[in-house]
Amino acid sequence: MRSWHAGPFLLVMFLLGCGYTTRNTAYDAASIFIAPVTNDIKITVEGRLYPDYKTYPRRIENDLTNALVKKFNTNGTLDVVSTSDAGLRLFCSVIGYDKNTLQYSDEDKGEVKDEVKEQQLYLHVQVRLEDNTGKILLQKEVVGETTFYLYGAYAKTEDTAWQDLLTDTSRRVSEVVLDLW
């Protein structure tokens, strides 16, 4: 009588019947066009509570566009193309940028009184995903964030923190677009 070995059979069945894939199955499209990000931050709002002028990083929309293209290329789920006739079209606009103080120095530890020690950056982005017919598939606000120390063992420059903010924001945008479950 012949002995049956289930190992190879189960392996073949697992590989053929497995529902996992590295491709995005939520959309029929295989490519995405990432439109240049627009900057829709309102810097002259009437009736502002505080008349202080806020400053924003230069080229905020260009830097985010580059970060998004890099993130989607790295992910590889959708092919990033340079023409708007792709299966999907991603439109993003920067609608806010905030820099908040999280921690001040501690005079008891010999630090300069009331010096900012830790800050947090937020980047607010309105995301809209369309198919190639113009039908809106997704519309949502995404907020990227990063925290950094200005001095001490874990200190970062604000430029380095800005790069971290772009990385976090592009990751969050790609998650909103690709992870629909």
Image (cartoon, rainbow, N blue to C red):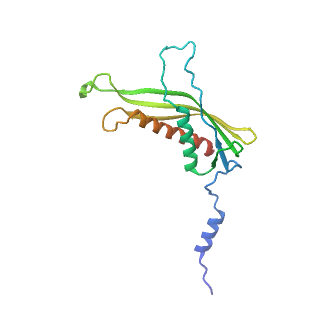
From the top left corner, tell me how far across and down residue 53 is, in percent: 48, 18
Residue at 41% over, 33% down: 158
Task: Say which of 82 and 19 sits in front.
Answer: 82
Work out whether 83 lies above or below 96.
Answer: below
x and y, in percent, of residue 51 in the image: 49, 13
Going by the image, does 120 lie left or right of 34?
left
Asked if 36 appears above or below 79 in the picture, the reply is above
The single residue placed furthest to the top in the displayed view is: 47
Where residue 44 appears, as percent x and y from the top left, is 56, 17
Residue 154, picture quadrant: top left
The residue depicted at 61 percent of the width and 51 percent of the height is 77
Q: Measuring 57% from the left and 16% from the top, which residue is drawn there?
A: 45
Instruction: Decide if residue 78 is on the left or right side of residue 63.
Output: right
In this view, the residue farthest toward the right is: 133
Dividing the image into 4 quarters, which one contains the N terminus?
A: bottom right
Residue found 54% across the figure and 27% down from its top: 96
Residue that extends furthest to the bottom in the rendered view of this protein: 1
For this rendering, which residue is in front, 150 or 82? 82
Query: On the image, which quarter does residue 90 sit in?
Result: top right
Q: How many callouts does the rendering have?
A: 0
- Which of the image's four quarters has the C terminus? top right
Depth check, front residue: 68 or 6:
68
Whole-percent x, y for residue 56 in the image = 49, 26
